[in-house]
Structures are given as structure tokens and as C-alpha cells.
Amino acid sequence: MKERSIGFRRNIDLVVKALSGLAALTGIAFLVWILIVIVVKGLGAIRPEFFTQLPAPPMMPGGGLGNAILGTGIITTLATLIGVPIGLMAGIFLSEFGRDSFLAELVRYATNILMGTPSIIIGVFVYVIMVAPMGGFSGYSGSVALAIIMLPVVARTTEDMLNLVPDAVRESALALGAPRWKATVGVVFRAARTGLVTGSLLAVARVSGETAPLLFTALNSPFWPRSLSEPTANLPVTIFNYAMSPYVDWQAMAWGSSLLITTVILGITVLVRTILGRRKTT
Amino acid sequence: MITEHTAHEPDPNPQPLSGTGDDSLPGSEPIKIETRGLTFHYGHQQVLFENNLDVGANRVTAIIGPSGCGKSTHLRVYNRIFELYRNQRVEGKVLLDGRDIFHPEVDLLELRRKVGMIFQTPTPFSLSVFENVAYGLKLHYRMGRGEMAERVEGALHRAALWDEVKDKLNHSGTALSGGQQQRLCIARALAVQPEVILMDEPTSAIDPVATAKIEELIHTLKKDYTLVVVTHNMQQAARISDYTAFFYEGRIVEFGLTKKIFTRPDRKQTEDYITGRFG
Amino acid sequence: MGSYRGVQDRTFAGLATLSAGTVILLVVGIFVALLAGSGPSIREFGARFLFAQEWNPVSQQFGALSSIYGTLLSTGIAMVIAVPLSLIIALFLVELAHPAVSRVVGGAIELLAAIPSIIYGMWGLFVLAPVMARYVQPFIGKWAGDLPLFTGPPIGIGMLTAGIILALMILPFITSVTRDVFNMVPDVVKESAYGLGATTWEVTRQVTVRHGIMGIVGACFLGLGRAIGETMAVTFVIGNTHRISPSLFAAGNSIASTLANEFTEAAENLYLSSLIELGLVLFLITFLIQLAARIWLQRTRRKLGVTR
């Protein structure tokens, strides 16, 4: 038996610590770099017209992405109206009715698969079941694609949050003679409200930058959204088209949109964190 | 298995203290750890107040007191494990075999090899039973497979666990029962040949039968090691220890032979505590 | 009154079950719809589709090999970069950094995980690709240019750049999950390793990582699943050519980038069908990855004696 040199062990420890500090610094430097570029390049495009006007043709000054901003708002709102209720109900099924049943296990498995399915596949799927049969791209199909992406996120959070509510709460509501649905909606939901709100917010944040599923569903449009049964302008696809274009002013618009989306998403994320943080401390 | 502890054969019946409440052992007892003026702060809060305590070699010293009295903190100074966390400050001297453990030349890793620790909850690593015991050995020593196996077996024997696990050395340590897990942790600590073993409420998460086994084990271990055991269970302190220190609000109220503390305590506070009449 | 309640309750339970059923229906529906949409292509090319390299809309010849190759290669590069880096950053955050630093940096990393992938892609195209072309690729070419892996002109876009962008995209994700896993290792377990005289690295390597291995591998699988189907981050920088080149500098494509670029342009039935079949292949790959993750987790659980 030989003793291992403590000096050697300490040196290895030091080297690893230095490396990990360096790696952390590198990783963080890249991420900060990305953020700075978004802000610096994006700020230049953010003017009042950016929010209110239609896009100008390339090489022409002025113009904005008002139509895409409005379109994204509409598509996302509709997606939320479809995705969140179904997701909530699916989560309720898992935690209140299904529990350990075979069906619930199957639903959980399907939820995981759906969560891991690349968003572009969802786009192709909606194309096959909606766009092709209906004969054209539409805002509706874009909303459906986003709703499908939100669905498993909301279902999973709902189940997790409802599982945190002790059974005693449910039982005491039922013991008072409340019907099952009132017990769930009134008592159980109230107990889990924060979690459900934050879960839905996160789902919105998750889809508001999604581009791939909109490429072959909502497509894009240079006009103000008039009807969701037509191709509808939206920010992510606009970013894609403009960034890939050779025109400098269009690229600038794409950066402006990136900044806008990033700000909204980071805003939602920070909001969620503060809500959850405040809840934890009280 | 070679035992490297050639220290004095411990006297099976320690003599009663002549003086009272002076926190020191009778002159005849060899001292393993000498604590002088130990003061401890968590941030701005002082939790230990200039405590003196002598830990006799090859003795079991119990530290008792109500929760929050600083008994665990005191124990966690002996292997400097408290240094893992920020905002903690210690003053005073702790001499292990006459050498200050805070001296810059004292190697922290070597100190912790010499002073092993057992925690409230069993803490097996997510490794096999064998690897758990070999973990510390591999840290400090380089040796062949044969010798390693021999030492692991030796440590498991000394922790009175060998017969129960010899057929499942490759099973995960986390799959053992609670009492077995705790003895696995003891074996893991013994494997690196410590001189002192600190136990922080070692049986508080374990059922009574397993507790009895561990108490028995503590008895046999004191032949080779010095033990300091923090416990909130006074009967346990009475059963296992030679000396007892009673902590209250960060101060050592009384220290002496366990027999004496539990039968004729000098201080009213001690008496109130051990008789359960604590305000 | 009682029966009225009963109806309400039954309606509620029925709605919940229906919603849950929708999830199953969607998964099955995706598979069936993609399969049906692939019909013409499957009939035309059969298994050859998977192994043919040629992808030519003019001559109506479609083979998925270059897209599959590109998908696997770019994901592979991303994982090789992102996994070790994430683990070591998580280690830094949990074990080394001052708590205040850890909180700020950890929060920033979580925020970055929420940034949409198209923005990573844009950054890759406008910022990283020029840097790669001007500095990184010539530098690598100078030292390792003899390897077939690093031949070709430094054009900036290509497999390597795509892999790096993907890595940056999944890095925050894997890091934050791993950090949570490290944080879940009880202090007392770490203390008992330190108590034996272990250094921080020794504790991490053998105790913390082993304790959280299931969570870490799970995080890596999730990151892998994200990278493999990621579209926008890759499409900007991969180059979009249907060619297989051993060089990491060369332009290529992935299943997702091919779909993003060509789907709306595919006028002919067979072309569209081949693209849908590409989607089917991607869906099956992600499905297999998830299945592998699940099986691995179950086996490890059993091995560790965790009954749950």
C-alpha cells in the first residue's frame, strides 16, 4: 500500500477548478455575445413605424412590420385558446381521474413523445391534415400547429401542479358535498393557480418564437391580416425570409423583430420567475 | 488486517473526576483532542462561546443537549467540515494529538482522513457496496486489487456488516436497509484508518434493532478509535459513553464521567435536562 | 338535483378524458398522416430512399442519405461540444462559484434557454459564420488541414458551424437541468465524501455525478432530441446542399433544413411526398431516441435498486 501524494491530488483539483471556471466563462461569454448582438443590431430598427406600418419594398426607406406583429399576436392568441384548455383538461385527467390507470400511462407516454417531437414535424403534420385538404396556407393552420406544440407543455405542468395539491384538500371539498368538477375547478385549481398560470405563460413563451411549424402553415404575407383563412403575416417567418434576403434594410428589420421577440419571451420568463419566487418566499 | 493503533490499552473503568465542571479530564487520561476557547459564528450569530473540552483517547465522549445548542456545530469543527460553507467563523484552538488543526501546515485532506465522520442519515454513495468502502481507500492510497479487497473486507468486518453483505458486494449500497447503510458508512470511514470517529446523531434515522447493533459496534470500536458522539437521546448517551458533555445555548454546562453526570450532576440545569424537567 | 349533478360530473370527466385522448390521437395521427403522405415516395423508391444520396427535383430522384448524414453529424458535433461543457459549467455553478454569482449566471442561462432557435440561427449566419471563415477555419486548416476532416475552403457556413450553433442552443438547456440535478444531491452525501478527505473534484467525479447520473443522462437525451430536430438554428448556417463530404468545413444539409428550405417550393407530388417521408424518418429517429432513453432509465433504476 502506497500513499497517494496529496500535493498531486490537490493540483488535479486546482486544474479542474480552473478549467471549469474557464469553461463557464467561455460558455457565458458566447451567450452574452448573442444577447449583445441582438440588442445592438435590433435597437436600430425599432422606431415607431416598426410597430405601425406595412413593410416597405427592399431598398426603400421606412416601413415596418406592423402586420407581422399583429399577425403573430392573433395566431398565438388563437393557439393559446385552443391549446391551453385542452392541455389543462388533459392534465386534470392525469391527476384527478386517470392517475395510475393504463390509459393515463399511455397518455403520459404520448405526452412525452409529443413534447420531444421536432416542431417542424408538427408543421408537416398540419400541412398534411389541414393545408393540403383546405387548398391553401392559412392563419388557422398556423394556430393549430402552435396549439399542438403547447398542448403537452400545458398538460405536463398541470399534472405536476395538481399533484402538489394534497388529497386532503380534494377530500374535504368532496366531503362538503361539492360535485367533483366543482371540487376540482374551485378548490384544487385555486390551490394550484399560480402553477397553472405560469405553466400557460411558459407555453406561450415557448411558441411565440417558433418558426418551423409556421413555415408551411401560416406561411407569410406582406399585408395586414384580414382573415385567418389566408396566409397570415407573422414575425418568425418574416425574420427567416428577411434574414436570408440580400437586402441590408430587410436584415435590419429581422434583427429588430428578433429583439422584439426576445424581449417578450424574456419578459414572460422573468415574470414567471418572479411569480414563482414570490410564492416560494411567502 | 493489521491494526496500526498501538496506543495504550484503554482502561476499562475510567476513574471519576476529582474536580467538578472544569471541562478537563483527570491527569491520568491520555487526551486525543484538546479544545480551548472554541468560539463559532454563523454570519453574525454566535453559536459557540469559548468552550473547552478534552476528548479522551480510546474513549466514547457523548455530547448531549437540546436541539440548537451547538452540539453538532462543535462536532463539525473537529474535521473542519464546516469550512464547506460560507459566512462561518471559528476562533480558539483545537489540538489533535497536541497539534492545532487550524495550523496552516496541517493538510485538510489528511486531517479528514484521520478524523472520520458519520452523519444523521446514512449516506451511501450511488456505488456498489464494495466501491463505497473502497472509495476513501482509493482517494488516499494506491494498491493492488488483492490488497484492496482485503482491506474492504476488513473494514466491513470491523463494522459488523461483512456477514450480511458478503454475497452482495456488487449490489448498490443504496439498496441496503437503513441500519445496514449506516454500518456501510461506518465501514467506509474505518477503511481509511482514521484515529477519531465523529458521529452526528448516528441512529436518529434508524429503527431500534439497528440502533442496538450500532451501539454495540460503538462499544467494540473504542478499543481502536476515539469516538465523539452527538446524540439527543439521553439513554443512548448513558449506554454508550464514558464521558458526557452537556451543551446548552452554545456553552458547555457540565462535562464529566457519564456515570456521574447521569447520577449526581453538579449543575441544576444538567439535572433538569436529564430528568426531562427542561423548561 | 342529484342526477343533474351526476350529468355535470360525467360531462366534466368526459371532457377531461377526451382531452387526454387527444394527445394519444395526435401522436398516432402524426405517424399515420406522415405515412400516408409518404405513400407515393415509398412506392416509388422503397428502401432505396434511405440509402440513395441523389436528391434531384429535376430528374425526380430523391434519396435521404445526405440529409440523414447531415442530421446525425451536426447533432454529433453539437453533443460532443455541449455535453462536457454543460457538465463543467454546472459544476462551476454548484460547487465553485460564489452563491451570488451562481444565482445571476444560473438565471441568465435559464433565460437563454428560452430564446427561440431562429435567433441563434441568425446570430450564427451574421456573426459566427464570418468569424469562422476569417479566423477559426484558417487556423484549424493551418494546423490540421491534412486531415480529411478539415479540408476545403473556409466559407464559414457548413457542418462545423451548424454543430457549434446547435451546441450553443442546447448548452443552456443541459446546463440548467444538470445544475438542478447537482443541487439535488443532499449536502450530507457530499459532506460524507469530503469527510473522508476528498477534494472537490473527487467528490464531483465519483459521488455527485454518480448520484445524479439518471438526471444527467436524461438531460443529455432531451438535449439530443432537441438538437436532432432543430430547424431554424441549422438552416441558416448549414449551407443546404445535398452532398456528403467528409470535411466538417463543407456545406451540407439536415432533414429539418431540407424541409424548411424546400417544402413550400415542392410543386410535384413525388417531390412533396419525398419531403414528407423525410419528416417521417425524422419522427422515427426522435421516437427511437426517446425509446432508448426510457429503456436505459428503467434498466438503471432496476440496477440501482430504485423501485418506482
Image (cartoon, coloured by chain):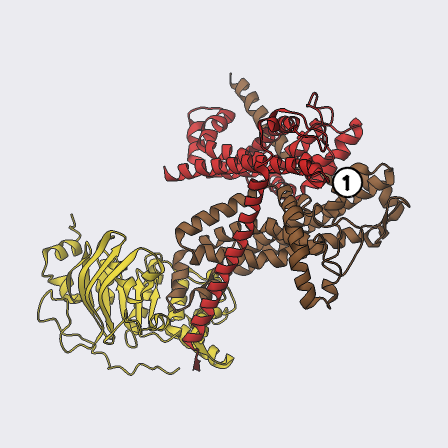
Chain colours: A red, B yellow, C brown
Give coordinates of residue C197: x percent, y percent. 39, 69
Relative to B122, residue A182 above or below: above
User: Does dot 1 land on a helix, a strand or a loop?
Assistant: helix
Q: Are there few (<14), some (14-19), or many (20+) residues within 10 Å of tag 1?
A: many
Query: What residue would you read off at disc 1?
Result: C34
Relative to B128, residue C229 above or below: above
Residue A34 or residue A169, whichever sits in front? A34
Looking at the image, can residue C29 be seen?
no
Residue C294 or residue B182, whichever sits in front? C294
* Residue drawn at 10 percent across, 55 percent down: B268
Looking at the image, can residue B207 be seen?
yes
Q: Residue furthest right?
A: C59
Left or right of residue B80, residue C237 in this image? right
Give coordinates of residue B8: x percent, y percent. 24, 82
Relative to B229, residue A279 above or below: above
Please state which amino acid type lies under the numbered disc 1. Answer: Leu
Residue A71, quarter of picture: top right
The N terminus of chain A - image quarter: bottom left
Relative to C81, residue A203 above or below: above
Give coordinates of residue B199: x percent, y percent. 31, 64
Give coordinates of residue B138: x percent, y percent. 46, 74
The C terminus of chain A - image quarter: top left
Please report, as a chain letter, where disc 1 is located. C
